[in-house]
Amino acid sequence: MTKFSDLSLNPKVLKAVEEAGYETPTPIQAGAIPPALAGRDVLGIAQTGTGKTAAFVMPMITLLARGRARARMPRSLVLCPTRELAAQVAENFDTYSKYVKLTKALLIGGVSFKEQDTLIDKGVDVLIATPGRLLDHFERGKLILNDVKVMVVDEADRMLDMGFIPDIERIFGLTPFTRQTLFFSATMAPEIERITNTFLSNPERIEVARQATTGENITQGVLMFKASRKDREGTEKRNALRKLIDAEGDKCTNAIIFCNRKMDVDVVAKSLKKHGYDAAPIHGDLDQSQRTRTLDGFRAGDLRFLVASDVAARGLDVPSVSHVFNFDVPSHAEDYVHRIGRTGRAGRDGKAIMICAPRDEKNLADVERLVQREIPRLDDPLGGGVTPTSEAAAKPADDSEKPRHSRSRSRKSDEKTKEQKPITEAPAKTEAAKPAPETKPAAQEKPRQKQDTARKDTPRSDNNRSRNNDNRGGNKVVGLGDHLPDFIGLSFEEREN
Ligand code: AMP
């Protein structure tokens, strides 16, 4: 078996690695470090949790150990999709460059420009940045990229999701043609393939197995959830989540709870807190100091439940998460793999539990296709309490009229919504006609997914009923527009039932 000492790393790096407690390189490290040290381009297909950060950080430190940066001309560049990931890369540099004198700067949102400007002005060996921030700096004339010798693109597939690919292409164009490129992505989407074909030169390709997909140490389960009424979906779903958590008892020492939308992240965190659970949210709209505080608390074990969006949690290294709860089925199947990969790390056992509402069933099928297994269905923790179909059947009109506004309402006012609220009141229809605000939050974090999310979520969320009436009901009602007279909706549903 390869040892770190076989890898021709700088002895000072080896000393730091040893002190960090690592003896054996992970497969991505064993595969990527030698060609990187030989000056070759590397294409690493590996997801987070495989040790991929150290796979580029260790050779970079070794390569940069000699030489000095000139003012405003960083010698290397690491591009990351999120601030958290950038901060994590910076931490890795600190760990492994303990005995090597290297300077670094971090260009990420939420960190003051001034401080980083001063560092860059002096000259840095390593510049770790999110693409937007880097280009801002460049455009202000604060940065010259002509001396970049090594450029790393980390989590390229996430960059693609977030709409950063044009920025990445531009940055590639601003760095010298002779640079060495270390490129990492969990998957190889066609667009990523195109970028690597364009900007990498004869790369050494290292692909490591998707650890989470087949992770036998992660027990998975899904609760097929259906609200008793659409206007109670949010409340009941959060109740189901609490029951699922409670059912795990002491085994659930800490957990990440993933939601598809930022707004839900806030609502779920708030609701858990209200019910006495130690929970806090993390997503892209929170300021940096708050995000850092929350994360540090979670890592230190002071916070039990981290409620997160995909982007905020991607790449985060929290080694001992006992559980992952998916409050929603992710709309991109790949995200399921990333999400559940947060648990069961480093050989520990983990548990991944998901809630699937009727509108998410197609997404669930996509996930199961990707992971090539059926995720076991869980018993309803409420003993059928979340699906009192008799109630729904007794009130067909409620069920028939609420769907289109239910999701926006569910976030804001589930708890406030009066059970007997007239189903045809004007605000409900107004909201029904405006799906856009709902899809925006997700879009801010993942611009490229905006249309998808809108397309997938909105119509499907409308139509719980479609399962019973093969879609006819949902489509027809939507087609009637804003001014659906009450009686049409009512009689229509009656007929369907
Ligand atoms: P990453 O894939 O970079 O997010 O790394 C995931 C985790 O693996 C981090 O907690 C690292 O500290 C840890 N790690 C990195 N290299 C090794 C190694 N050679 N052996 C064991 N753990 C490692």
Image (cartoon, grey):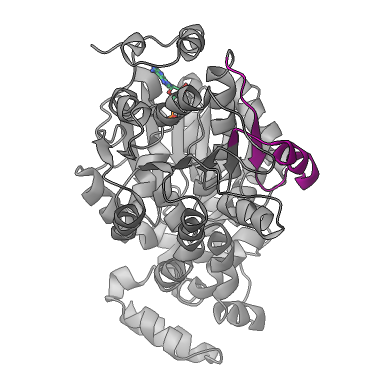
On the image, the x and y values in percent for residue 399 come to 46, 71
The answer to whether residue 362 is above or below residue 212 is: below
User: Please, is residue 34 above or below residue 491 in the view?
Assistant: above
Horizontally, residue 349 falls left or right of residue 127, namely left
Q: Quadrant of residue 46?
A: top left
Nearer the observer, 335 or 428: 335
Q: Is residue 491 visible?
A: no
The stretch drawn in magenta includes residue 122: yes
Q: Is residue 306 left or right of residue 289?
A: left
What are the residue bounds of the magenta stretch? Answer: 100-126
Q: Nearer the viewer, residue 255 or 3?
A: 3
- Residue at screen point 31% across, 11% down: 6
Does 461 appear above or below 353? below
Q: Is 135 left or right of 259, judged from the image as shown?
A: right
Residue 226 visible in the shown view:
yes
Q: Position of residue 58 (x, y in %)?
A: 45, 23
Residue 141 in the figure: left or right of residue 164: right
Instruction: Place residue 476 in its image quadrant.
Output: bottom left
**Residue 313 place in picture, x, y as percent:** 52, 40
Q: Where residue 337 sits: x, y (%)?
A: 35, 41
Q: Quadrant of ligand 1?
A: top left
How many labels, in total? 0
Quadrant where the C terminus is found in the figure: bottom left
Quarter of the N terminus within the rendering:
top left
**Magenta segment includes 78:** no
Residue at the extreme left of the image, as rendered: 372
Question: Which residue is nearer to you in this view: 358 or 332?
Answer: 332
**Residue name at image x 42 percent, y 29 percent:** 343
Give the residue displayed 70% in from the left and 32% down from the top: 293
